[in-house]
Image (tube, coloured by chain):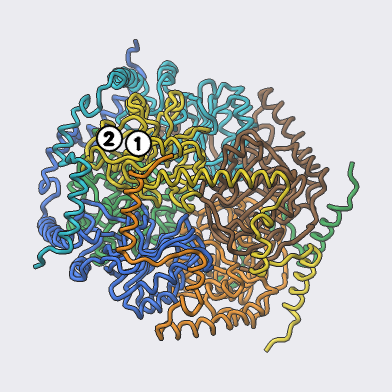
Chain colours: A brown, B cyan, C yellow, D green, E orange, F blue
């Protein structure tokens, strides 16, 4: 596979990235209409860490980290490295040496559809990672790929310069042109959640707050006491055996 | 899907629940003849926490948390919320707002066949969770389901009022009518394990303690030195090539 | 299934085991030409622990821990218990009682292709474990198997006496006859990595350090500015619709 | 694990079973409010076969087929054998010899949460099977279990005497007391589907037939031409970079 | 989730689609530099069928087929329906009624990241399908989504109007603007493969045809007779135990 | 990774291979004490085909088929190619061109822990395949590996020259030195199965034939009528709530 290394892609505004870093992954996804999430298979290798940054994307051959070397040069302050492979792989393509080089360049973390290794060392140096697998399996440097082209991981398209936000709940991508609007909406969403939290602490039910009692009625969901429910079940059973048949 | 919300189901006696809370999940499962365990796919989202409580069950449509809102009203002191979906789902149906509302009502945790989100917030507030997935994916409130009907998760039936016990090893369900007996048997089991532990610390072998040397003999399991084993392998290889053939 | 319990197999030299314990799993695997790793499905049940020891191997029937009892007697100072089953299983075959017995005998940990239970207790007593699953499911003692025969876990053959090294990144097996050589190579590898780390901290790029710019050129990987790349994409789209057709 | 073999459980009326055999699995599940389905992991080992019968249930230890032997005696004309294990297993617990014995007794097929073997022989003799796995792995006869107790497979409870209906789409369970009513509803559902099929063949759209245009409007789903959509995307991108910031 | 239904997107030229239909999925993927493939989890529900068409894309809520109804109206002669969900789902969102409506409109098949049902009926009517799962689970019509927006399935982005080619080996997407070029390259690739096939039938080895003997030499891959290899292994073992140590 | 290509390994006697070809995979595995099976993830890409041959083994880098080219030269009449990768891969490393070359050399099939492509073409030419995945993903020829070294697939070690037997139930490996003995035992096993089959057809139960009634009794498995069972359940429930507590 030949490929291309794209230099100087447009990036989301650092102010918007900073604003988005103030919200959780769930909040930002909600603010985008419940979209943007990488699926639940991409998990953090540490706990209690949240980072936001702009994506530098890598498309690699499985078992090969050549293009990550090429990507390092394209990475700078405030970036997050995003790595995928052309076919499913769990190899530990990314480890402590890459983290060292990226950390020095101001990169904030790595998100990969493949594997990470040296996880203890990464936690020790405070370099955050999200991955499909933890694996010590090393890789070669023999096959081409691309840097800073759009990649697709677990149902989401990530373009260079898009905002990556990641925490214990997973990873969300915010298209760079929607970063500002999404930060504003996330703030509104958070305010709304704060009001709901206060109401819940005060004893209000979601059923009442969101008007869901009517929804349940409209869907023919009935309330029954346990006794009514049991009697109905028993009746049904008797009818099932004794009932007239055509 | 229409459904039913069953109110005031019978519950296991709180004294039995308290008694069961004193044992680990493995011990209680052993005490029930090695039954009652939800499979290994339901994992804790925290470490070092054990809770026991009475089940309030929810059967939801995938991607929809309407019925969890209905269930909150049915939850009270000492309950554990148990959520499943009509088809496989990893969505983060349960998060910090639900935990806030349930925590206030004295609910002790959540067990779900789907996903949990806001895991860091849940750990911070001390609300325990067990789930198949961690996912920030939000849900809608559009489709009916049921509350407090029997549900099946990973090979186990859970009825409202049954005892749920969960720790780092997973989740076990104790039918409400067997709670008392199971607590007694767990105590006996624990005593037996303590004696075994002391014997093992004293150097006794399981082979002797359980009379397994005869079992091995009866199963034709032989002891061989490494040298005997190697010679047999080599002999077999030679015969394999030189032996007479019919 | 009948079977065999092999006594007194040859073991790797304790000095080599001690030397290997000084390196990470990833380093040792690299030193063996990127081989020897059990796949990414075998995960630690604790964090931040590294152990090395000599393998005592067990081949068990699924749902049955009889042969682990037989293996305990074969275990001694510096060993690591390695357990697999004749067909896929997630049962919690190994728990706190076995750990107690093995701990007393100087065994350093357990690696299993099946499940572990009592994980909190194991962490508390400092007995390390790596497993495919955490499960409270108990097992019987009814069917035979073997101890100290070669076993295959996740693509690797493990023979009794081979060196097992395990940490947060996973598990690697070093054939006993290659332990000495591998420790030497690991040391060389580590020195090489230290030099690379220093160079990376100094700002050198992997592209230059490994001569990868020529590799990229040889693979026809091109550099393009984002503007060039976008223009090419648009051009391609126009040609796609307007181009001459045969 | 001790256990129980329950004899002579009540069974669904053969007339209702015969009636249900006339419908597909999807139709019957729809007729029960989209419930009753075993999940998509239980797959047929043949193609183009549909069977209906009454469940004889088996709960076995993994790697052990003792209880299937006990179940054979409980099986008769019109039954379907339903097998699950106390923990996940893929072993080939069921093969041609069991099929021979059951075929002779008028049993119509097997549904198992574990594995099947001798699949070619089963197809040759016309004995239908649905399983999680195909595996040649044989099993022992050493550990107890139960026959004709309720079992839970993939989210569904199956009791002895319940109706099992299985085809290329999977397996559905109809509680025995709901068999008659479900057959009637399935017939109504089929009639409704026939009318829809005719309307669709006549060119009517689901959007119109089900009044979904209003649903879409109520959900704020908008129609846009491709040109409008592209212009909006581009505008958004420009605003994203040039817009005023607070 | 609100959404958008995009009408009249540009489509690949039917002549190019027809040309691509003449090649296998593997050939076309090779012709695009080994890219474009949906991963191996999307499998055909029939055998021996190959279709090519232009994508009409659907992004649906899990457990909900509302947007497929909206998409039917956007489908026409030569299209292939491509369905994905906002989070992982195996539900049988697509069945015989949809196939009937689409078949009448000249649609050639369906590719879905979720599930298909009525598989026997689809095979009978000659409507081809590729899916992650076969499941009879029905769905509701309650939540919005989008039609003819770009979607990401298993690592690939599919835009409306792109070419979908599917056969027994899986599914490949050809961007609409690259359809013509890819058809030409596929033809060249096929010619090359025909020459290779002839050479192989004539006894030539890939080692010689592709000049791989030098590659092997350059990678230090050595040839050894079995005897040499065995002797080396034994020597290594002896040295491992007897060798001098520092 | 450097590697080695081993030439002229010893092979199982063709007469034994021919004898083993007369039995099913399940029978041969039983004859070896229920061992030798590759796990259930390696599935056939055709139906109704059984082959036996001697293994030529390949250890490849993921995404790379260089070593298969090297292996072709080592393959001859009566061999079966066995391919694995150094880390998990689903790539379509093996397709119609390799099958053409091997078919000409008298090779009988391929077994791979990775993927196969051109499955329709393979079925058409009668070249049998077993694989973990079907995938059109092509591979490069850039990284070294080994031919005719022992490999481990799904829990089994396969050495060059060992017998591979594969059918619809999966794949079994017979160590070359045990081929003769295993063929004899398989014959005995088949005779025993024939007798059992006849007995079963004659109405005998496995319970009686294998003396399992005593086994059940020894395991405390009780027989109860449905009525007794129900009464016990109800009694237990009442006691559960009314019983004395300490």
Q: Quadrant of the C terminus of chain A?
A: bottom left
Observer-nearest of B216 and B242: B242
Q: How far across and down, in percent of the image, does residue C147 sit?
A: 26, 40
Q: Is residue A135 left or right of residue D207?
A: left
Badges 2 and 1: C-beta atoms under 8 Å apart? yes
Q: Is residue C199 left or right of residue B151?
A: right
Q: Secondary structure at mark 2?
A: helix
F5 relative to C20, above or below:
below
Kindly identify the residue that appears in the image at 34 percent across and 18 percent down. Answer: B187
Q: How far across and down, in percent of the image, does residue B140 sit?
A: 63, 44
Q: How far across and down, in percent of the image, does residue B21 sit?
A: 44, 20
Residue at the disc numbered 2: C71
Query: Does mark 1 fall on the same chain as mark 2?
Result: yes
Mark 2 surroundings within 10 Å by alpha-carbon count, few (fewer than 14), some (14 through 19), many (20 or more):
many
Which disc, if any, is residue C81?
Answer: 1
Q: Which residue reaches farthest bottom?
A: C246
Res. D15 visible in picture: no
Q: Secondary structure at mark 1?
A: strand
Q: How far across and down, in percent of the image, does residue C230 sit?
A: 78, 66
């Amino acid at each position: 596979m030949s490929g291309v290394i794209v230099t100087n892609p447009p990036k989301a505004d650092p102010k918007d990235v900073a604003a988005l870093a103030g919200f959780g992954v769930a909040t930002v996804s909600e603010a985008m209409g419940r979209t943007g999430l990488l699926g639940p298979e991409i998990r953090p290798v540490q706990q209690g860490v949240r980072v936001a940054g702009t994506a530098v994307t890598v498309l690699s051959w499985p078992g090969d980290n050549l293009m990550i070397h090429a990507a390092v040069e394209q990475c700078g302050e405030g970036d997050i490295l995003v790595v995928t492979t052309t076919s499913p792989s769990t190899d530990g393509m990314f480890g402590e040496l890459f983290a060292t080089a990226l950390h020095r360049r101001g990169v904030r973390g790595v998100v990969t559809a493949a594997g990470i290794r040296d996880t203890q060392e990464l936690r020790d140096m405070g370099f955050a990672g999200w991955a499909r697998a933890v694996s010590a399996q090393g890789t070669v440097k023999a096959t081409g790929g691309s840097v800073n082209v759009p990649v697709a991981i677990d149902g989401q398209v990530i373009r260079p310069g898009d905002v990556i936000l990641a925490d214990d709940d997973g990873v969300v991508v915010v298209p760079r042109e929607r970063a500002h609007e999404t930060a504003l909406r996330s703030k509104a969403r958070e305010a709304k959640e704060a009001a709901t939290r206060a109401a819940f602490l005060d004893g209000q039910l979601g059923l009442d707050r969101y008007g869901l009692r009517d929804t349940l009625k409209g869907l023919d969901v009935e309330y029954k006491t346990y006794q009514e429910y049991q009697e109905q079940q028993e009746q049904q059973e008797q009818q099932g055996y004794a009932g007239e048949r055509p």
